[in-house]
């Protein structure tokens, strides 16, 4: 069974940091784009950051550029999201996801078919 399991969320004050982890199991996601999305209460799920399908490039939403950093450890089948200088507007459930198609770089929610259960990030002011 293919699974993505996120961890690392929590409550942090504005200006603080958190590191999210996403462990993939069941199969390898080599040649699949991997990314992070978030969904705030009452809002749609939106793109945060992703790797290209080759893993060689990274992409970020404008709202997190310069504060968030995506990384990966292929030996551990794990993708990370380092979040620094957190703001109250970063409060959301954060999801890890894998693209549905190989060899496709994308930031569209609808192009990602495997999702984790989500981890809550709450930033207090």
Image (spheres, rainbow, N blue to C red):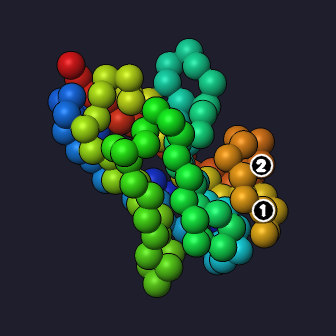
Q: Going by the picture, which residue comes out furthest to the right?
A: 101
Residue at image x 30%, y 28%? 87
Q: Is residue 124 left or right of residue 62?
A: left
Residue 25 image point, x, y percent: 57, 71
- Asked whether residue 42 appears in the rendered view, the answer is yes
Residue 89 image point, x, y percent: 38, 23
- Asked whether residue 7 appears in the rendered view, the answer is no
Find disc 2 in the rendering and name its residue. 111
**What's the CA distance linking mark 1 and mark 2?**
9 Å
Helix, strand or loop under label 2: helix
Helix, strand or loop under label 1: loop
Give the image quarter of residue 92: top left
Ranked by sequence position, the earlier of labels 1 and 2 is 1
Q: Is residue 74 left or right of residue 104?
A: left
Are the residues flagged by discs 1 and 2 in contact, CB closer than 8 Å? yes
Q: Total of numbered circles in the picture?
A: 2
Q: Tell me if residue 75 comes above or below residue 22 in the rendering.
A: below
Comparing 26 with 91, the one in front is 91
Q: Tell me if residue 1 comes above or below residue 107 in the rendering.
A: below
Residue 9 image point, x, y percent: 33, 44
Category of crowding for the residue at label 2, using alpha-carbon neighbours closer than 10 angstroms: few (below 14), some (14–19), many (at least 20): some
Residue at image x 43%, y 65%? 71
Find disc 1 in the rendering and name its residue. 104
Residue at image x 35%, y 35%? 121
Image quadrant where one finds the C terminus: top left
Image quadrant where one finds the N terminus: bottom right
Q: Closer to us: mark 1 or mark 2?
A: 1
Q: Which mark is residue 1?
A: none
């Amino acid at each position: 069974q293919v699974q993505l399991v996120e961890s690392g969320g929590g409550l942090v004050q504005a200006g603080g940091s958190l590191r999210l982890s996403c462990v993939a199991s069941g199969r390898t996601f080599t040649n699949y784009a991997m990314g992070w999305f978030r969904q705030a209460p009452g809002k749609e799920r939106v793109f945060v950051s992703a790797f290209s399908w080759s893993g060689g490039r990274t992409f970020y939403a404008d709202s997190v550029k310069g504060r968030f950093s995506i990384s990966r450890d292929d030996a551990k089948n794990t993708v990370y999201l380092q979040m620094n200088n957190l703001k109250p507007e970063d409060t959301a459930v954060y999801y890890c996801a894998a693209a549905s198609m190989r060899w496709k770089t994308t930031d569209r929610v609808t192009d990602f078919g495997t999702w984790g259960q989500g981890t809550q990030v709450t930033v207090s002011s």
